[in-house]
C-alpha cells in the first residue's frame, strides 16, 4: 500500500493545472443542450456486446456507424443564436453552424486548423493575408440566404459588424486590433495598428464566426432562433426552454472517408 500511494503522490498536480481541468469540465457541461445532429428519426441503437478487449468504459461495444441521432440535455437556456451576440448555451453550437478563418491552438501555436481560409501569409507583424477557400457553401435555410460559397465580402462585413456593435462579444478585440479590412478577389487583408501576438488565436474564436453578409442585414432580431451558415450542421428548430434540433449541412465542404463520406 505504501508503494502505491507513493507512486500516486509522485505525480504532482499544480493548482493551475487543476483549475484548467475544472474550467474545461465546466465549459463542456455548459456546451450541452437538447439537440439532434443528423437526419432520420429511427430509435437509438443500443450497443451490442463486443469481443473481449474490443470495448472500454466509454464505448461498451458495437462498431461505430454514420447516421442516427445524438441527444443531450442541459438545464440552461439557449439564448440568442446570433453568432456575435450569443453568450448562453447557443454559443456552444456556433462552431457547428458557422466557420472561422483559421483556428490556432492556444497551447501549441504551431498547430493551425484552416477552415474558411485555406492559406495565410504574414508579410509583416501588422499584416495578415487570408486566402479564402472555394466551395465553403452555405446550408439550406429559411432566411432567404442563397446557398452560395462564402467569400471575402462576408469576412469584411462580419468583422466590420464586430467593430461597430458594442454588444458583440469581440467588440473590444475588433475595435482595438483591426485597423482595416480589404478584399481583393479571394484574398482578405487585415491590418492591425500594432503587433499583437494573440491575433490569430483571437480571430479564430467561434465568437468571430464568419456569417453570410445577407444574414447580418435587415432585422437581425430574427437570429434569436434562426441561423444560416456554412458549417457542418444547420439549425432546423428552436423552442427556448425546451429543445433545439440540428441536421447535417448537405453542402458542407469537408468529408470524412473513415465515416462513410
Image (cartoon, grey):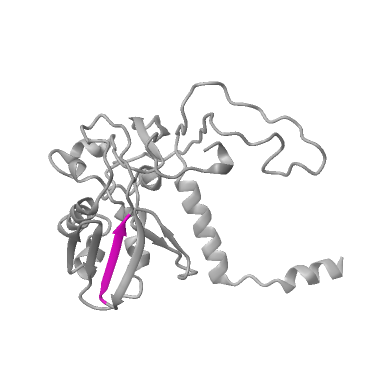
| Residue 146 seen in the figure | yes
Question: How far across and how far down the image is residue 122, in percent?
Answer: 31, 73
Residue 65 is drawn in which quadrant?
top right
Q: At x 79% / y 70%, what residue is drawn?
A: 7
Query: Across the whole image, how many numbered discs are drawn on residues?
Result: 0
Up-down relation of residue 55 to residue 181 (above or below) = above
Up-down relation of residue 4 to residue 144 (above or below) = below
- Along the horizontal axis of the image, is 89 left or right of 193? right
- Along the line of sight, the residue nearer the viewer: 178 or 150: 150
- Along the line of sight, the residue nearer the viewer: 8 or 110: 110
Q: At x 49% / y 59%, what residue is drawn?
A: 23
In the displayed orientation, state which residue is furthest to the top: 42
- Along the line of sight, the residue nearer the viewer: 76 or 194: 194
Main SS, magenta residues: strand
| Residue 89 seen in the figure | no
| Residue 97 within the magenta-colored segment of the rendering | no
Question: How far across and how far down the image is residue 80, in percent?
Answer: 29, 41
User: Which quadrant is home to the N terminus?
Assistant: bottom right
Residue range corresponding to the magenta coloring: 126-132
Amino acid at each position: 500500500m505504501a508503494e502505491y500511494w507513493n507512486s500516486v503522490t509522485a505525480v504532482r498536480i499544480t493548482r493551475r493545472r487543476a483549475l484548467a481541468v475544472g474550467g474545461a469540465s465546466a465549459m463542456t457541461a455548459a456546451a450541452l443542450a437538447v439537440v439532434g445532429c443528423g437526419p432520420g428519426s429511427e430509435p437509438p441503437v443500443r450497443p451490442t456486446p463486443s469481443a473481449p478487449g474490443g470495448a472500454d468504459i466509454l464505448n461498451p461495444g458495437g462498431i461505430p456507424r454514420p447516421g442516427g441521432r445524438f441527444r443531450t440535455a442541459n438545464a440552461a437556456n439557449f439564448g440568442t443564436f446570433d453568432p456575435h451576440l450569443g453568450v448562453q448555451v447557443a454559443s456552444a453550437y456556433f462552431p457547428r453552424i458557422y466557420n472561422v478563418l483559421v483556428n490556432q491552438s492556444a497551447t501549441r501555436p504551431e498547430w493551425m486548423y484552416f477552415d474558411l481560409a485555406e492559406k495565410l501569409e504574414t508579410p509583416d507583424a501588422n499584416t495578415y493575408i487570408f486566402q479564402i477557400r472555394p466551395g465553403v457553401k452555405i446550408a439550406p435555410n429559411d432566411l432567404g440566404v442563397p446557398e452560395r460559397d462564402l467569400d471575402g465580402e462576408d469576412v469584411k462585413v462580419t468583422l466590420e459588424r464586430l467593430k461597430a456593435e458594442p454588444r458583440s462579444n469581440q467588440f473590444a478585440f475588433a475595435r482595438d486590433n483591426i485597423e482595416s479590412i480589404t478584399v481583393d478577389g479571394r484574398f482578405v487583408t487585415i491590418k492591425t495598428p500594432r503587433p499583437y501576438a494573440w491575433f490569430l488565436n483571437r480571430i479564430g474564436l467561434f465568437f468571430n464566426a464568419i456569417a453570410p453578409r445577407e444574414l447580418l442585414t435587415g432585422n437581425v432580431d430574427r437570429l434569436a432562433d434562426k441561423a444560416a451558415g456554412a458549417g457542418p450542421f444547420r439549425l432546423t428548430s428552436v423552442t427556448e426552454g425546451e429543445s433545439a434540433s440540428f441536421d447535417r449541412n448537405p453542402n458542407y465542404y469537408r468529408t470524412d472517408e473513415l465515416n462513410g463520406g
